[in-house]
Amino acid sequence: MFRLAITRYLNNFRGFSREIWILAAITFINRAGTMVLPFLSKYLKEDLHFDYDEVGTVMVFFGLGSLIGSWLGGKLSDKIGFYKIMVFSLFTTGIAFFVIQHVTSFVGMCAAMFGIMVIADMFRPAMFVSLGAYAKPENRTRALTLVRLAVNLGFAAGPALGGLIILGIGYKGLFWADGASCIISITLFWLLVKEKKKLPTDTAHAVVTNKYHSVFHDGPYMLFLLSSFLTAVTFFQLFTTLPLYHKEVYGLTEFHTGLLMSLNGLLVFALEMPFVGYFERKKVAKLKIVLWGSFLMGLSFYVLLLNVWLGVLIVGLLFLTFGEMFCFPFSNSFAMGRAPRGHEGRYMAFYTMTFSMAHIVSAKAGMGIIDEWGYNTNWVVMGSAGMLAMLCIVLLQYNLRSEHK
């Protein structure tokens, strides 16, 4: 029985090309070294002594840089190819991390975060397009999931290690680790993976016929982007307000926060691929799964209102983790399948831009609400955002049914 379960689990990882496995491996190396983001709000607050409003403003510039970088990365991927964008983005980001640790002023940090995120987030739409090039059409959702697993396995190791680095040598060590991981991972990619310029034909796996030639004319896709934005706003509380909440309300250390985040990463690593494989075998509609994911994300913040027991943090994290596993792989796949031929970069750029916009709103709104009305009000707002995302998916399903008539 146990051997059968292991065999079924491993079967979910079969059928990928060599390039996909290499992409997953370098993603893991990069993500394991990405330790700054989970502790950025704490670094700004406690090491640089910024107030709540200044922390929120820095995170706004972080999000603005991410927004522009995502747009540039998608546009340039369609024009000059995803491969060049990926190499340029990660290598230059690694150098920038070495420099940014010396920036300590508020204005300087705003400018530095904006600049580094413009460069860093050019990588994301290019990486999504690369999956379209190197993955077989029938494996695309699982290929997306494999790379997400690499991200989350790295994320499971990174925050816990990051917490130890902070306790041992301080926040500066995180910037060296981030920079080195960027340079090492993209160098391995450049050495092991050759550029592939043509995308495989995917008409059989497209969500609808490619009748739209502009994202702005694709009404259902715009509704989908709104839902993705709302779920991202709720999810990013994990990196912005929750670490502060852990310390200020429950007295947890950076190491304890890192362990909680590692639990999120380990659960995703263990369960997401079997979930995706199961849903694909059962031919469950992608948007139906995303709908349930949005509901669970919203619920994860309503649970935090029961702040009389430390275990509530774990319960909330579990709901958030399952919501993440349901939402993100299938929303990624829906976005890729919706893109017309030749516009993949632009469509994935707008998809990743929703996450960049969410960084801006999630950090600034979360910090502002907490400063003015407290944590519980923020949890109500974020929980409601998750439920509104679920409503958007319901409307999207209705629109798509009308589109097919």
Image (cartoon, rainbow, N blue to C red):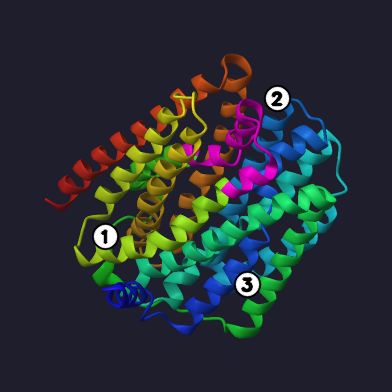
Tell whether 182 sits left or right of 144. right
Real-space CA distance between mark 2 and mark 1, rounded to the nearest whole angstrom: 43 Å
N-terminal-most mark, 3 or 1:
3
Identify the image quadrant of the N terminus.
Answer: bottom left
Secondary structure that dominates the magenta span:
helix
Real-space CA distance between mark 3 and mark 2, rounded to the nearest whole angstrom: 38 Å
Q: Is residue 258 above or below residue 342?
A: above
Residue topped by disc 3: 84
Q: What residue span does the magenta drawing correspond to? A: 233-259
**Whole-percent x, y for residue 305 in the image:** 45, 24
Q: Which mark is residue 53?
A: 2
* Residue 81 visible (yes or no): no
The three-letter amino acid code for the residue at tag 1 is: Val
N-terminal-most mark, 3 or 2:
2
Q: Residue furthest top?
A: 373
Front one among 200 and 284: 284
The three-letter amino acid code for the residue at tag 2 is: Asp
Residue topped by disc 1: 207
Q: Residue at x 49, y 44 (%)?
A: 354
Q: Residues within 10 Å of mark 3 (few under 14, many from 20)?
A: some
Question: Magenta segment: does it hold 65?
Answer: no
Q: Residue at x 66, y 31 (%)?
A: 251
Front one among 378 and 202: 378
Q: Is residue 278 above or below residue 202?
A: above
- Which SS class for mark 3? helix
- Which SS class for mark 2? helix
The three-letter amino acid code for the residue at tag 3 is: Lys
